[in-house]
Amino acid sequence: MTTAKQYLDILRKREPQLWTESLEESPFTENDLSEIEKGLGYSLPIPYREFLLSYTMPENLTVLVSFCGDSFANSWWKTFSREKNRYIDRPEHDIGPTVQFEWHNIKGNNGAEFLENLKKEQTAEEGCACFLDAGFIQIGEVYGYLTFLDLVNGGIVTIHEEGVYDMMLDDGVNGEDKAEVRNYMESRRLYICKDFNGFLRFVCTGDFLDEDEAKFPTQEELEQDYSY
């Protein structure tokens, strides 16, 4: 299986302009990760632990990612993205959109700093404070869809920013009750990657992601099942 370092090396070669300096080894130790887990009250999924121990990441990266499937590729977001010049056509097959993903990483030289910055950033934003307590770390955003790492099952889950308010206003979820938030997110089946390793493949390689099935189709499947 491809490691976190290998995926990040791939991205570094594909998009060298994203880094102003060479990749540096992460300062985190296993003790730092244990401190983070203690502060959060959740265990960190193994692929995410590996990622945190790999390299020191820029705080914000904008990377191109590719979708196929029904949820995004055939939605009105496709038209919206084209109008906003954020949609990139694939001339050989109309498989799905390639769009910008805003990838956010938490800064910190040790576990205490990481935890402090995480809580400061992800509990201050109106409407999103409930997610961290419920075990969801926000790792980015793609055209209005907030993207989270689920600390409980390790998957990558999305919800539209307007859906956060719908969750509380229309569906009656108590945003201060972490159990209600978790039950809502799990019941909606909004998971696009099975684990953080899949997320790294998604953001680092440019491979098409079928967000409906949380899988990466083969080239043969793309040509047979996703082109129109």
Image (spheres, rainbow, N blue to C red):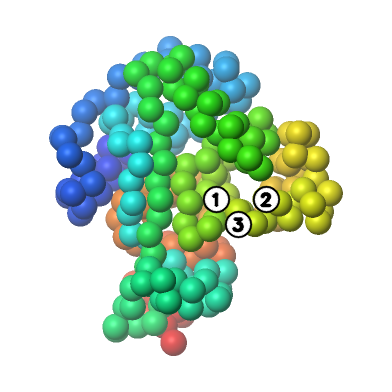
Element assignment for label 3:
strand
- Residue at 60%, 57% in the rendered image: 160
Instruction: Determine whether, in the image, residue 44 is placed left or right of residue 41.
Output: left
Q: What is the count of numbered marks?
A: 3
Image marks 2 and 3: residues in contact by CB distance under 8 Å: yes
Q: Residue at left 63%, top 21%?
A: 41
- Looking at the rendered structure, which numbered label has been put on residue 160? 3
- Looking at the picture, which amino acid does disc 1 mark? Leu
Residue 195 placement (x, y as % from top left)? 49, 45
- Cβ atoms under marks 1 and 2 closer than 8 Å: yes
Question: Does 125 sit above or below residue 227?
Answer: above
Amino acid found under the numbered disc labelled 3: His
- As drawn, the label of residue 146 is 1
Looking at the image, the residue that sits furthest to the bottom is 228
Q: Secondary structure at mark 2?
A: helix
164 sits to left or right of 7: right
Per the rendering, the mark at residue 164 is 2
- Pointers 3 and 1 in contact (C-beta within 8 Å): yes
